[in-house]
Image (cartoon, rainbow, N blue to C red):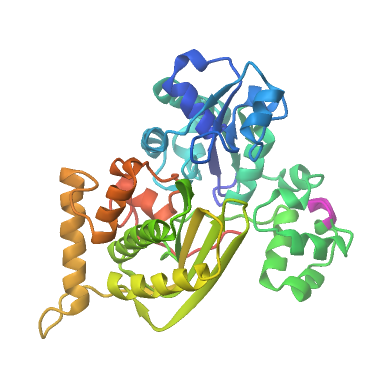
Amino acid sequence: MSRHNNRILHIDGDSFFASCEIALDSRLEGRPVWVGGGRRGDGIVIAANRLAKKYGIKTGTACFEAKRLCPNGVLCKPHYDAYRELSRQMFLILEEYTPTLVPYSIDEGFLDFSTMDEHVWRNTTATDYVQGIRARIKKETRLPVTAGLANSAKLAKLATDAAKGTGFLEVPAGSEKEFLKDRPVSEMSGIGKNRQRSLAAFMAFTFGDVARLPSMLLKQKFGIWGQQLWLFSNGQWNEPLVLEIKDRTTISSSTTLPQDEHDYEAALTFMLSEATRLTGQLRRELMQAREFSLAVRFNDFTEVGTSHRFKHPQFLNSVINSVLEQMFRDLMADAHRPVRQIRIVMFNLERLDTHPTLWGRTNEERWGALDDATHALNQKLGKTALMTGAQLALRHIDESQKQPKAKCPFTPQREMISKLWGADGPVKPVQGTLL
């Protein structure tokens, strides 16, 4: 293998939430297991292990249908805090094997193995080395993982998908085009339905079909992305792994109320409490939002929504909550059905400067200091040691909110990096692109 060839390993947890439940309870070993979402953990399936999938159970299946398909299977309610901890343990193991580890989601990440053949694999093989990593993760966390090794992150991920059920697959240097030729382009992330339809117009359904097209045709149709796709399909996309930490572009919350709420004032209190939480999270990340959207879903699954754009980006609870309250009241003016779910999205985010200024403390700086102190106290004394008025009112309205459940752990990459290595990550952020 040429010293200039990149070797990127992709590690992916197998049916991660279901595997976590089995890791937490050894009695579930060898049984079909699925994890249910919804307010009582019996809504739709959000993860199913391989044994459950053999019965036709998959993400999105109703839990009652899953039980009909597999009467002897086990439904588990989600334990998100435990999933986060098992994920952290897995990544702490992985970081021992590479100078560059890029977490991608709670259950998958990429490792740079580009120089392993020179320094590590002299007396072993890539297969034996990676199988050793998989075995260690399984032993120490009880989590099964699948891995793929290739010359780019995108190809490594495709190799992992192809290795499901076997554990590991390497695409050796020089064999990329052969590996890809019969694989559908729909398998690669970043190729949505519109691009698939555009490629289908050129009779390009597989990467082999794309490789046979003129590169200039793809450039004219798709720009730089088309050129990258052509290079990738021909096995010529040799991409280094970089750790890229980007600012958040949006922050959102979709909260299903503990029960269908007939009292719209109570639903409003839920919304204001969640808006306060999101705004505090934004300020801790030194961000502020210019645009907001609000959607309310009723118990018959119909919904109404609206949005608002500020002239200047906002970071104050009083300003944001005041506008959101008016948006909520406008939406509910003619409503008559009970509220099931409330969704808030804050987007068009900009940086918020909370650093001290030469002429004294700014309003932004004071809010930053207050957020830091509040966060530190809640970390030390409990999540609800300090609350806003809306959050306190919510505790009185609903007993279940006195010990709020953890949010689903689809953690943004920058937060995962911060939890593993601190605020700035293990290396200086490098700008780079994946295909």
Residue 285 sits inside the magenta stretch: no
**Quadrant housing the C terminus:** bottom right
Nearest the camera: 143 or 66? 66
- The dominant secondary structure in magenta is helix
Instruction: Name the residue rendered at 70%, 73% in the picture.
Output: 223
Taking 254 as reference, is 406 above or below it? Answer: above
**Is residue 415 visible in this depiction of the protein?**
yes
Instruction: Name the residue rendered at 52%, 41% in the picture.
Output: 38
The mark total stands at 0
Instruction: Find residue 7 and report its image quarter.
Output: top right
In the rendering, at what x and y percent does residue 64 appear?
64, 30
Question: Left or right: where does residue 66 sit relative to residue 122?
Answer: right
**Quadrant housing the N terminus:** top right
**Is residue 143 visible in this depiction of the protein?**
no
Nearest the camera: 369 or 434? 369
Question: Left or right: where does residue 87 sit relative to residue 206?
Answer: left
In the rendering, at what x and y percent does residue 296 appear?
52, 61
In the rendering, at what x and y percent does residue 125 appear?
55, 28
Residue 206 sits inside the magenta stretch: yes
Instruction: Find residue 362 and report its image quarter.
Output: bottom left
Instruction: Name the residue rendered at 50%, 63% in the picture.
Output: 432
Q: What stretch is highlighted in magenta?
A: 205-209
In the rendering, at what x and y percent does residue 126 appear?
55, 32
Question: Left or right: where does residue 106 sit relative to residue 4?
Answer: left
